[in-house]
Amino acid sequence: MSQPTGPASQGHAHKQPAPPPEAMPEAMPEAMDVTLAINGSRKTLRVAPWTSLLDALRLHLDLTGTKKGCDHGQCGACTVLVDGRRINSCLTLAVMAEGRTVTTIEGLASGDALHPLQEAFVEQDAFQCGYCTPGQICSAVGLLEEGHAKSDDDIRELMSGNLCRCGAYPNIVAAIRQVMDAQPSAKDGGAP
Amino acid sequence: MRAFSYDRPDSVDAALRGVAGQPGTTTEAAVKFVAGGTNLLDLMKADVMRPERLVDISRLGLDRIEDTEGGGLRLGALARNADTAYDARVQARYPMLSKAILAGASAQLRNMATNGGNLLQRTRCYYFYDTGTPCNKREPGTGCGALTGVNRIHAILGASDSCIAVHPSDMCVALAALDAVVRVSGPTGERTIPFADFHRLPGDTPHIDSSLAADELITAIDLPAQGFADHSTYLKVRDRASYAFALVSVAAALKIDGQTIRSARLALGGVAHKPWRDPAVEAELAGKPASLETFREAARVLLRDARGQSHNAFKIALAERAIVRALAEAAGVEHS
Amino acid sequence: MIAKPTIPAPLDRPGSQIGKPVSRVDGRLKVTGGAKYAAEFNTPGLAHGYIVSSAIARGRILAIDTAKALALPGVFQVFTHENRPSLPWFDRKWKDDDAPKGSPFRPLYDATIHHALQPIALVVAESFELARYAARLIHVTYEADDHRTDLRAAKADAFTPGKDKGGFQPPPKPRGDADTALAEAEVSVDLNFSQAVEHHNPMEMHASTVIYHNDGSLTVHDKTQGPINSQTYVCNVFNLATDAVRVISPFVGGAFGSGLRPQHQLFMAVLAATTLKRSVRVELTRPQMFSFGHRPETLQRVALGAKKDGTLTAVIHEAVQETSQTENYVEVVVNWSGQQYKCDNVRLDYKLARLDTHTPLDQRAPGAAIGVPALEIAMDELAAKLGMDPLELRLKNYTEVDPNTDKPFSSKELRACFQQGAERFGWHKRSHAPRSMREGRQLVGWGMATGVWDAMQGQAVASARLGIDGTLTVGSATADIGPGTYTAMTQIAADILGLPIEKVSFQLGDTNLPMAPLQGGSWTVSSVGSAVKAVCDRLRDRLAGLAAGLNDGPLKGLKADELTFADGFLIAKSDPSWRLSITEVMRANDLLVLEDEARSIPYYKSQMKHALGTHSAIFAEVRVDEDLGTVQVTRVVSAVAAGRIINPKTARSQILGAVVWGIGMALEEESMIDQRLGRFMNHDFGEYHIPVNADVHDIDVIFVEEHDDIVNPLGAKGVGEIGIVGVPAAIANAIYHATGKRLCDLPITLDKILGA
């Protein structure tokens, strides 16, 4: 019999007898104003520094199209475009995105006209449950913009940061390929 | 994630003022720089790291990639990993580095992660991440869970009884092989740290990862002129085809004259608490014919002191084979 | 955009919608971010819960100090076993539709710790971040007992379970004398297998958003494969009336079995909402996704005896599987081995061993995905020993009746699967000796295996509402966890009433809709689809009757079977120019809407006389880098016989995805437990490896023609599980063919290839 004690953290309690020194347990973060250009419109929100860009989108702006699949940068479901580049919004603080341009899945279509990748994903049945899909599509937008993918194997490798538990990968590659082929003028490499 | 305050200074000096007076190494610091955030924020969510204050350095510039006078290349500490890997000069002159960076993480993470941050990545040991388990690195004195637990991904070289964690970076393995130099700014001005001295072995203080002081900022990484562009490669062996940490990786670089090796660099990832180099083995390679036999002998000697744990002994044979494969590939020698 | 299929000429192809590759009707919502999942229903004042999990694997909580957490402004409450409200004592109150025999886990019930990562407290605060912070400040003191999480150690105490779970059939009694036949066999193989624990890990983490209404009623957005199951659980556990709890889950971000039982976040969210009288969301973290059910670790032995010509003379299949201390989780692992091949001497044995883990849980093709690969790897080994083409060996022992029951199959086009799959793959070009094919430095291997799954049907009810404008709304309280239920049901309804797809909508995921069973086991098309067909058939008959009753109409006196329904019209078969639109028929009868409801009841009588199943043949190509032990699955052909395919586009996707699951099972997925701590250690997506895009290459899916009018009125058997079943074996067999190494411990990670 043993009697481990300790702070239960990350849902897992602790074996170490003494809790680590707390700065001030009751310390609370101070909220800050953050202004972002999201999907074409300027938004100012008041968030504490510990709010991720992902949670700011989902909870503060009700832009729930961006998904939380792990919250640790290990699945890609939270992929959005910041200043045109694909990133994991779960590993960015909202305050760090101050002044940036953020494009989420909700900002890709123009009115009723879907983005070609959105069209292609539907056409190729590049999803099942749909949960990883916004991240996949935003990631694919970034991939096309980067211009480093030439072959299907390149697409596979450069889309590997987006897990799909339904296993729609072959159709995801087909959808991206379809759009790539329709854009012969796509960039031919170079730094993003 | 604990409560913390946030600041975004607009100059290197202001950033340094933010960490001024902090004792110890950066690993233990209560005030931390954040740029890409890809590892620090992850660890803060897991309650493994608990900084009281974050100093956002992502807008300080320091993101250029420039030629140096000596014919080398200076990689800005805040240049993103993706921009570094796809930089035409890096691709042409340091292809091994480009390949190593692109073997790591995902396109999204490489778009976020900075070069300086890559150096400060912390281990992916399960026990380090799980605050419900013992870990000397996370909480000194609690013991090493991995030593008697699940240690398939752990160290075979340079480990101690306190810690068998490995450094997770791919980029750093190539930088180690290239003899890169880390440029650092601190309260007393600038200093440089040879790459081999930047990371450390765990010993009985595994909670310290690097020799970077808590009041210092990485400003750049200098690559020497010799990039081994003709004969080098980066080989990464992992549990799936992409988006996984290395079980074993090898950065191999050779200078070859005819069939003879003039000089060699060999760094291993996934096997130790830091990118692993063995200068004696590299020296032995010089003057030898670039043959499989030579490479096998080098691999054997390099791993002579390797020690496996309950689940990871396979890494010893794997590392040997990976070294031979990488050297052969770098040399352009047919590997049968 | 929704693809708009062209409606064929009415008389040419009346059944025009079923069998068409219609794009998902919910596709637009999913690609625009408009589809809302359980954690995405936001409401003003929503509070957020964060779960604290146990550090120890077994023992009890001596104390939980929550003071620091509660002191934070904005923390509403910390729920623990010490302050929870009164909860029911009887096990039956905690049971759900997928519960096995035993005592279901009761969160926060008492101080007892049953397994590592067990939820032991819930912090509720005004924000997610604050709840997470406060959770870090909770200090727990435990008294730890010795735990047992090692199946190999527990095997000695294994016991034979009874019929301990719905759908479970214990193995049939032995036939003949398998052990003697094995000993006397001209050729025999005897292999031991192990299968690692796998966690479902759908992309959407389990979450429940409970909206609290002023009258005390709840709207619950839960991640579930059956909203009614969640509703019943909540009502029973919290003593609420059925009409006070409405569960709405229109979209589910994958589940694969994880949503078959109400998971503890549902309990937590309802507990907090009802106690605090406010709306609450509880979302698990990814590590916490390893804190509940999983595919159980399994140890197996398969021994086969045969004559030199390949005729099977003995089949022995034994399995020991983990379950928890509190419930008897069972699944059909070994029975398939008595069903797949003709053999007179068969002994099948299935046992459970108790571990200090959470009760296992059905995961895609439960049982079959573990047991069938063991049999199929053993068959491959037997073929190698016989010097026979593995495909020939299967054909040699092919059976048209189920030897376990002596019943004929309602349909079994497995031969066609073998033939078409082999042809597409180019199997005849295989050089059968191991290590005989290579490309450059890489060894190439070709392997094959058979898959099987049951075709099941449950009762379901569907409602339908036809408007005078010809729009049809059909509904049933099923789920769509990804297979394309919205689309398939829309097609069935459109087909029967001859309506364009865009005039039809299907509703699901709402307890206000008529009863549907859990979505699982590949039976949704069969169960709910049959109900949709039934209710649409009734509307059709009623419309026909209404049209026939119009004395001055062109269809006067015609019976339903004398009419065709197409493009919104009722058309006389005898003369297509005699027609009335649905709108005309309803207007003439002064009807604005036509509503109905129907229940589908399986053809129990004819089904009982038959064995019902789906079958498949899988052919896989691997490339093995023998120096480094890495394996790439370069090509897979999966030929499937699953009756009628309602939508070949979405059905193909299901098979593709299941093949990816098979790749994961064969090569990557493993929840690694620290036996000393009794805890899964690689509990995240970084270290629990599921296949990534770069792991997946060419996958070719064939649906062979198969007619079946016994399984259900649609003749559709469902394809959710069959796609995974044989895949791990086909890959393991391909690795054997490439390397000559027979590997029977899944997943086959590179260290196993290096070590063999």
Image: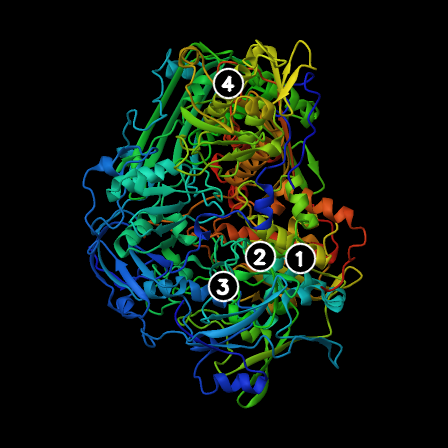
- Say yes or no: labels 1 and 2 on the same chain: yes
Q: What is the CA distance from the residue labelled 4 to the residue labelled 3? A: 53 Å
Name the residue rendered at 64%, 78% in the picture.
Answer: B62
1 and 2 marks in contact (CB < 8 Å) = yes
Q: Residues within 10 Å of mark 4 (few under 14, many from 20)?
A: some
Q: Is residue C211 visible?
A: yes
Nearer to the camera, B163 or C65: C65
Residue identifier under label 1? A142
Name the amino acid, label 3. Ala
Of the two numbered discs 2 and 3 in the rendering, the one whose residue sits closer to the viewer: 3
Of the two numbered discs 4 and 2 in the rendering, the one whose residue sits closer to the viewer: 4
Residue identifier under label 4? C542
Q: What is the CA distance from the residue labelled 1 to the residue labelled 2? A: 10 Å
Q: Earlier in the sequence, mark 1 or mark 3?
A: 3
Q: Is residue C130 left or right of residue A169?
A: left
Name the amino acid, label 1. Gly
**Subunit ID for the residue under disc 3:** A
